[in-house]
Image: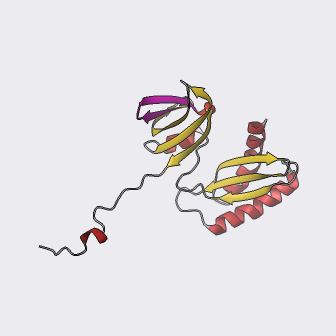
Amino acid sequence: MAAQRKAEIEGLLGPTVQALGLELWGTELALSRAGGLLRLYIDHQDRPITLEDCEQVSREVSALLDVHDPITGNYTLEVSSPGLDRPLYGAEQYARFIDSDVRATTALPINGRRRFQGRIVGVEDGQVTLATDTGPVVLAVADIEKAKLVPRFTPQAASRSSRKGKKDE
């Protein structure tokens, strides 16, 4: 039911976000009796997301949600960039980040495990292949409950502080 509602919301909001020159990267919907949260991740292929992008999407989407009212009860709308540790939702997103590190949690255990971390080495027929420390693992995208990129940070070749006090020879 939640996946169907999420798909309905993405179908409703996606064209509006696209009309603004942005991509609806993904959505998260968490509902409770006390209220809920609808989080939209927006992206742009050629530049970083700005605060103005988030504000513009929030205004346009709020109006659309008010008219169509796909979520009953009170909820908070949050619009943001996916960030460096962006969540991944579909096979096309995994394919876009081949050779990137990812952390994934499956809905049900696979070989006794639900949590996996590795480098995305392939995506085919709705399945993602990860190179992990224990060997390759193949996960069906449909079985992945949550996945996020793990940013790689490379150290600088020589930092200024490590060269203090040394004279050039």
Indicate the quadrant containing the C terminus: top left, top right, bottom left or bottom right. bottom left
Answer with left or right where residue 145 lies relative to residue 59.
left
Answer with left or right where residue 100 lies relative to residue 92.
left
**x and y, in percent, of residue 4 in the image:** 76, 37
Indicate the quadrant containing the N terminus: top left, top right, bottom left or bottom right. top right
Q: Is residue 17 above or below residue 149?
A: below
Residue 55 visible from this viewpoint:
yes
Majority SS type along the magenta span: strand
Which portion, as a residue range, is magenta? 128-140
Q: What residue is drawn where x is 52% and y is 59%?
A: 46
Q: Quadrant of residue 48?
A: bottom right
**In-front residue for pair 161/51:** 161
**x and y, in percent, of residue 77 in the image:** 76, 57
Residue 160 visible from this viewpoint:
no
**x and y, in percent, of residue 141 in the image:** 59, 33
- What is the basis of the colouring in this image? secondary structure
Answer with left or right where residue 30 lies relative to residue 121.
right
Q: What residue is drawn where x is 50% and y is 43%?
A: 102
Q: Is residue 2 above or below residue 69?
A: above
Answer with left or right where residue 82 lies relative to residue 157.
right
Q: Residue furthest front?
A: 165
As for residue 1 lying within the magenta part, the answer is no
**In-front residue for pair 79/23:** 79
**In-front residue for pair 74/162:** 162
Q: Residue furthest left?
A: 169
Q: Quadrant of residue 52?
A: bottom right
Q: What residue is drawn where x is 86% and y is 54%?
A: 74
**x and y, in percent, of residue 31 in the image:** 79, 47
As for residue 131 lying within the magenta part, the answer is yes
Q: What residue is drawn where x is 41% and y is 30%?
A: 134
How many numbered dots are placed on residues in this image? 0
Q: Quadrant of residue 60?
A: bottom right
